[in-house]
Each structure stands twice: as C-alpha cells, then as structure tokens.
C-alpha cells in the first residue's frame, strides 16, 4: 500500500492505528436471511432465559467427521522458550460423528459416537436421550435445519413422542444452539492436540471428556438480549445493502 500510494511504510501504519484498522486480520460471518429470524430467535432465547416449568430444555446437534489423527513424529517436550509442538503432517485413521444433547438447565451432556450421520443414527440417539428423561417431563429440543432433523422418519418419531417439541434455529444461525459451545470446548481442550491411532482411541477420549464434563457440569446461561441481537443483524444487513 505504501508503494502504490507513494508514502512511507510508517505513514501507512500510523493511519491504520489512528483509525483502528487491521487489514491483516479477517473474521468469518454469515447473516441469516430467514424471514422468521426474529420469531425463532425470541422463541429459543426464551427457552434459555425462562424455561417452561416441569420441562427439560435440550440443545441437540452433531459434530460430524471427527478425524482420528496420528502425528508422523512425536511432539518435542516443553522447555523454556519453546511451546508445545506437533508435526504439520499426520496419518488419518478414520472418522466418527458425535451426537450430543446438552441439558441447558444443569449442563450435563448425553453423547454418543456413531459411524454414520443419517436419520437412522439420529433416531437411535433420540431414543438414547429419551431413556434418560424422567417420566412426565416435557422436552423442548433446540435443533438446526440439517435435513436429517426433518426427515419423515424423524417426524414419525416425534408424533410417537408427543411430549417432545423441536424448536428449529434460523438458517445460518447455528450459534444460537448452546451445544456448539460444548463442541468448541471439546475441540480446544481434547481434539486439537490429540494423537489418536485408531477411531476407538478417539471415541474413548471423547467418552472420557463427556464423563469429566458431567462430573462438574455448569448450567448454560444466556446473557444477550434479543433486541440487541436484532439491532446488530439489522446493522449488518444495512452495511451489506450499502455495498451492493
């Protein structure tokens, strides 16, 4: 930029600092175009902030294609001036899909690893979750718009379990699903630096992480008001419209 504008590098840097610009950094985003965004937002946030009496609120989703990665060489030991290391290349030993249901009231997670990611596996997981639900409890499940969640067989399952109610997040708004935070914690604390020589090792590691989480669970707390989210989304659309 300095060369093209015919000024010094320090001048460019000074201008960037003055205006708070950081062109070397990027952040990913996606604004939802769901026409029912506001209604779905208020519905889901309402479940988080003021759940119905005598009901259970679950945040359900899948973390698909988790890879069992083995490094080609052992990492070097930690020492003063050197952080943890791992080789840039790896060996693949297969994948698994983690189905999870986060109870937002107490923070416990029901999880199950399965080989495939189809409606058959999803129904098997719903049955596993149902087995943990106390009799007489109504279940409000927050799910995204993945086709598996709306499969005719899944709808049949819901009809056979009328005490279950699905609440779908708006399109392009998976961040509304509380279980995404659990997936992020799993990735950061267990998967990112893990070395797994088989899918079974990977599944065992995930199982231990689930057990550790459930030994000291923390209730999920939503703090952002819907009005502030709607205002931010409105500003985002205005900026996009001005560009186009």
Image: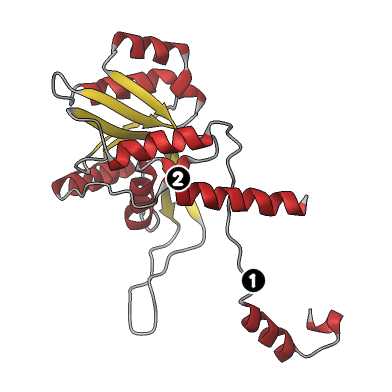
Q: Residues within 10 Å of mark 2 (few under 14, many from 20)?
A: few
**Nearer the observer, 233 or 62:** 233
Contact (Cβ within 8 Å) of mark 1 with mark 2: no
- How many numbered marks appear? 2
Q: Is residue 19 left or right of residue 148?
A: right
- Which label is found at residue 24? 1
Residue at (47%, 20%) from the top-left corner? 150
How far apart are labels 1 and 2 at the CA level? 25 Å
Q: Secondary structure at mark 1?
A: loop
Image quadrant of residue 129?
Answer: top left
Give x and y (percent) for residue 15: 69, 83
Give x and y (percent) for residue 159: 34, 9
- Which label is found at residue 93? none
Give x and y (percent) for residue 207: 24, 41
What residue is disc 2 on? 175
Residue at (41%, 13%) from the top-left corner? 155
Q: Residues within 10 Å of mark 1 (few under 14, many from 20)?
A: few
Q: Nearer the viewer, mark 1 or mark 2?
A: 2
Q: Is residue 175 left or right of residue 133?
A: right
| Mark 1 / mark 2, whichever is N-terminal | 1
Confirm whether residue 234 shows in the render.
Answer: yes
Image quadrant of residue 10?
Answer: bottom right
Give x and y (percent) for residue 46: 34, 37
């Amino acid at each position: 930029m300095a060369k093209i504008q015919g000024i010094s590098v320090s001048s460019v840097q000074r201008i960037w600092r003055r205006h708070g610009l950081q062109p070397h950094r990027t952040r990913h985003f996606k604004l939802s175009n769901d026409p029912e965004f506001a209604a779905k937002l208020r519905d889901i946030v309402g479940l988080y902030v003021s759940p119905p009496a005598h009901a259970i609120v679950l945040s359900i989703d899948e973390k698909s294609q988790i890879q069992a990665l083995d490094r080609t060489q052992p990492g070097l030991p930690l020492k003063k001036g050197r952080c943890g290391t791992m080789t840039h290349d790896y060996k693949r030993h297969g994948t698994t899909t983690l189905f999870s249901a986060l109870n937002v009231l107490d923070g416990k997670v029901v999880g199950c690893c399965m080989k495939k990611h189809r409606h058959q596996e999803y129904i098997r997981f719903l049955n596993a979750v149902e087995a943990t639900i106390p009799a007489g409890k109504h279940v409000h499940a927050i799910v995204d718009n993945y086709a598996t969640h709306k499969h005719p067989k899944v709808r049949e399952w819901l009809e056979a379990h009328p005490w279950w109610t699905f609440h779908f997040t708006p399109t392009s708004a998976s961040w509304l699903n509380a279980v995404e935070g659990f997936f992020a914690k799993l990735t950061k604390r267990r998967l990112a630096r893990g070395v797994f020589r088989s899918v079974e090792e990977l599944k065992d590691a995930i199982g231990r992480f689930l057990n550790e989480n459930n030994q000291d669970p923390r209730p999920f707390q939503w703090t952002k008001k819907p009005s502030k989210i709607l205002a931010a989304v409105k500003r985002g659309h205005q900026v996009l419209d001005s560009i186009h």
